Image: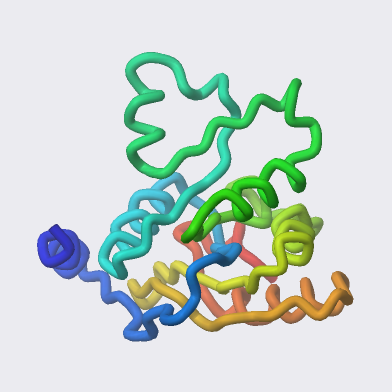
Amino acid sequence: MRKFLKFLLKLAGWKIDEYVPQGIDKCVVVMGPHTSNWDFIIGKITFANYGVNAKFLIKKESFVFPFGYYLKKMGGIPVDRKVNNNITDFAVKLFEESETLYLVFTPEGTRKYNDKWKKGFYYIALKANVPIYIAYIDYKNKRGGFDRLFVPTGDVEKDIIEIKQVLSKYTGKFPEQGIK
């Protein structure tokens, strides 16, 4: 299946970064820039090519028949925002209960330009004591993958600026909506 997925990306002109995550069983993945719904599809194919079963949190209301079945198969984890009003603790518990977990977040929180990132991914990584993998999608060069491993220092503002600097060198499908 991995060869077939890699073939699909190659057919579309995409190349997967050679950097493969190794030795990390649990991490938060911060993915950017997120400017299109295609990011999800290309990202899932890329993660599958790496052999990474990436998961993501999504509101439980999205898990309606028949889409709920497919969302779960693709790594979706339903979140009842009425019950789980502390998503950070919910995610930390997921890390505690899992042998392996790559939990993906798009910090912009939208496909439009947003200078005010959601910082939940950062606090989840800190509280769960897991590193952050910075992953990217670059439409300009038709590349995607993992850029680097990042260990949060606890200085949220400084670290967010550093992560933004890494991701700002990549171009989203709609560049004007990307990370600046």
Q: Where is residue 161 shown, x and y percent of the image? A: 78, 76
The image's colouring method is rainbow
The location of residue 159, given as percent across then percent down, is 79, 77
| Farthest top residue in view | 65
State the image quarter where residue 123 is shown.
bottom right
Image vertical order of residue 39 relative to residue 170, above or below: above
Q: Position of residue 131 (x, y in %)?
A: 64, 73
Q: In percent of the image, x 45 and y 59: which residue is there?
A: 173
Expressed as whole percent of the image width and height from the top left, the position of residue 174 reads 50, 57
Q: Nearer the viewer, residue 133 or 162?
A: 133
Along the horizontal axis of the image, is 159 left or right of 11?
A: right
Note whether residue 12 is visible.
no
The quadrant in which the N terminus is found is bottom left
Q: Residue at x 48, y 69 (%)?
A: 25
Residues 172 and 51: in front is 51
Q: Is residue 59 left or right of residue 5?
A: right
Split into 4 quadrants, where in the image is the C terminus?
Answer: bottom right
Q: How many marks?
A: 0
Residue at 47 percent across and 22 percent down: it is 63
Q: Is residue 140 left or right of residue 136?
A: left
The answer to whether 81 is drawn above or below residue 49 in the figure is: above
Residue 69 seen from this side: yes
